[in-house]
Every structure is written in structure tokens, then in C-alpha cells.
Amino acid sequence: MTYLKVLENLETLDAPEKLFGWMFSIARQRYFAWHRKHGRRLEYISYDDSIQRQELHEEASLTAYRVSQQQAEEDELLEIVSGAIDKLPDLDRKVIRGAESGMSYREIACELGLTEAAVKHRLHRARRKVRELVDGMEED
């Protein structure tokens, strides 16, 4: 549509060397007219503000990327730890899963038919074994 408007008004162009600026002016006027017609509010920002917005956008994108990378690393580590826990003997696995879920030593002991001291001992041993398994997996 801008091109047609240029053709319609070509005879009004005084200086042919200013054609591109003139075309830009027509396009700009049509752009603003369209926004006025359709009730869209235009936001005018300075060049400095646009640069600052761009920098903020780039910083936010970089932060989002870093967070997603960190989340991926945490998910991978969680998967490794979960795999290591699955390799534990059944009773040790139940003790460590109970502790992970927030159960007290007493609750775990009652559920598994152990003493609290046995739960503490098994939990300590299970955590040490998981650490060893994870360290072994990371070296591979």
C-alpha cells in the first residue's frame, strides 16, 4: 500500500535524491494512521531507552539460559542420585527414602520394625554408599 501511495504522489516529489527519505516518511505516516484508526496506543521511546530495553532483554535471556542450564544439571544430578539410591539394599533404600520424605527417625523405625539407633546407623551408611556410587558414576 505504501508503494501505491508513493506512485500516486510521485509528481509532488521535488528532489529525486530524497526519494528514499520521502518513501520512509510516507510509510511512517501510514503506520501511524493505521494505529490511530485501529485504536492502538503507540509507545514512543528514545533511542537510549530502546538500547537499555535491549540490554535488559539480553540480560534476562542470558539469566533464563543460565537458570535452565543449572536446572538441567540439577535434574541430571538428581537422576544420578536416584539411580544410586535404587542400587541400595531394600531396607537401606526404604530408610533413605523415608528420611527424604521428611519422616522422623521414630516414624521410619516404626514403619520398618527397627530401632531409632538402627535407622540412624543405616541412614548414615546408606548416604555414604550413595555418595560413593555417585562419585563412581561421575568418574565414568
Image (cartoon, rainbow, N blue to C red):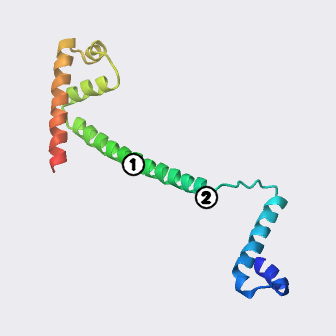
- Which label is found at residue 88? none
Q: Mark 1 or mark 2: which is in front? A: 2
Residue 107 place in picture, x, y as percent: 31, 14
Q: Residue at x 38, y 44 (%)?
A: 71
- Tell me if I can see residue 4 in this picture: yes
Task: Name the residue rendered at 24%, 35% in the picture.
Answer: 85
- Residue 115 seen in the current view: no
Q: Identify the disc placed on residue 47.
A: 2
21 vs 70, nearest the viewer = 21
Q: Secondary structure at mark 1?
A: helix
Q: Residue 15: x, y in percent?
A: 76, 85
Instruction: Please provide percent x and percent y for residue 10.
Output: 81, 85
Mark earlier in primary sequence (1, 2): 2
Side of 99 where 5 appears, left or right: right
Mark 2: which amino acid?
A: Tyr
Q: In the figure, 135 relative to 117: above or below? A: below
* Mark-to-mark CA distance, 1 and 2: 28 Å
Q: Nearer the viewer, residue 10 or 102?
A: 10
Res 84 → quadrant: top left
* Residue at x-position 18% and y-position 31%: 89
Residue 79 vs 50, above or below: the answer is above
Residue 124, by quadrant, is top left
At which x and y percent is residue 111?
A: 29, 17
Query: Mark 1: few, some, or many residues within 10 Å (few <14, many ≥20)?
Result: few
Report the amino acid beneath label 1.
Answer: Arg
Q: Is residue 32 above or below residue 1?
A: above
Q: Is residue 109 left or right of residue 102?
A: left
Residue 39 appears left or right of 66? right
Residue at mark 1: 66
